[in-house]
Amino acid sequence: MSFARVAHSNARRLIHSRGFAAISSSSPPPRTGTIGPYQVFDRNVKRIQKDRAAARDGGARSTTVDYIRDEVADRMMERFLDIKRKFNTVVDLGSGPGHFTKLLELDRTKKSIMIDASERTLNREPDSEFEVEVERIHAEEEDLLRIIQPNSQEAIVSCLSLHWVNDLPGVLVQIKEALQPDGLFLGAMFGGETLFELRTSLQLAEVEREGGISPHVSPMTDTRDVSNLLARAGFTLLTVDIDEVKVAYPSMWELLEDLSDMGEGNAIIGRRNMIHRDTLAAASAIYKELHGNEDGDIPATFQVIYMIGWKPAPTQPKPLDRGTGKVNLKEIL
C-alpha cells in the first residue's frame, strides 16, 4: 500500500504501512541520590520542542508533517471499531492536536478529554474539526492521576506519546487505576526498531569523524517487553501487535527537517547540544550508501507497537481451569 505526502515543497512518500533529530539546547545531567524513576528524557525540553513546532508558520509547518501520526491514528481507529462497545467519554492521553480524537464519531462516543503537556499543540485545531465534544486539559501526561480520578474512565487511548515517558511502567499503572472496572486501554507507541537507518548512519559517521558516539535517536521500548509491562501494570485480556510505516525522503536532511517540525527532536538528558556539520554530511552519505533506494530516495522506518488491555472486572471472561477441557486436541488436529 502506498501513499503520498507533500511537506515544504518536498515529496515524502509513504511507501509501506501495516517515532529523532537534535535540538540546539542543553539540559543538566540527571540528578542522583533521588527517589523515583530514572530520568531519561528532559520533559521540559520536549514540551518546548512541541510548542515551537506547533507555532511555526502559525501551525502550518506542523500540519504538513502529520502524515505519520494520522496514519497510526487511522490504524488505531480500526482496532477501536473492532470493539463492539459505545463509550460516553474517551480520554486521549498525549493527544497532541487530536489525531485520534478527530476520527471519533458520535455513534461510538460522545466526548473526548484531550490531555497534552504542550499547550500550543493541544490547541492547534479549532473545535469545529471534531465531531464529538472536546475538553482540553493542558497537563503533564506522567501525572495522570492528578488530573483524572481513579476508577472514573470508560476508555483511555494514547497515540504516539508514550515513547517520551520516563516512567512507562508507572504511567501504565496510572492508566489502569484511572479506568473503571472492565475499562479499555488502547495505545500505540514507537518501538525499538524505529529510525534504525538514521541511528546507524549517525553512529558510523561519529566514529569516523570524531572517534566516538553519543545518543541522537531516542531509546525506545523493545517490543518483547510491552506485554510484560501491561501485565505488570494489572491489565488483562492483552493484545499486542507490531506494524511498520516506511517513508521515503529525498535525503537525510528532509527527514531531520520533518522530525523537527513534528516536535520529535532529541530530548535525552545529557545529550550533546550540537552535531558538527561535517559529521552530519558524512552521516547523510552513509545513509544513502547503506539504505538508499534505487530511485535515489532514502527510507525511514517507523516501527509501531499497538496494545490493547482491559482493567480486570468480575464480569470478564476467564479461561477454564487446566484439565477441564472435553475435546481431545489430537482429534481436532
Image: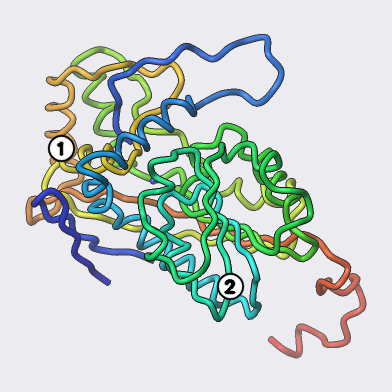
Q: Is 42 drawn above or below residue 257 in the view shown? A: above
Lower sequence index among marks 1 and 2: 2
Query: Which one is in front in this view, the residue at disc 1 or the one at disc 2?
Result: 2
Query: Is the C terminus in the top left, top right, bottom left or bottom right quadrant?
Result: bottom right
- SS state under label 1: helix
Q: Which mark is residue 109?
A: 2
- Between the C-alphas of marks 1 and 2, the distance is 41 Å
Where residue 272 sits in the image (x, y, percent)? Answer: 33, 16
Residue 255 visible = yes
**Residue to which mark 1 is pinned:** 253
Q: Is 274 drawn above or below residue 175 in the view shown? A: above
Going 43% across and 47% down the picture, which residue do you hit? 122
Going 24% across and 44% down the picture, which residue do you hit? 58
Total labels drawn: 2
Residue 3 lies in what quarter of the image? bottom left
Going 46% across and 62% down the picture, which residue do you hit? 100
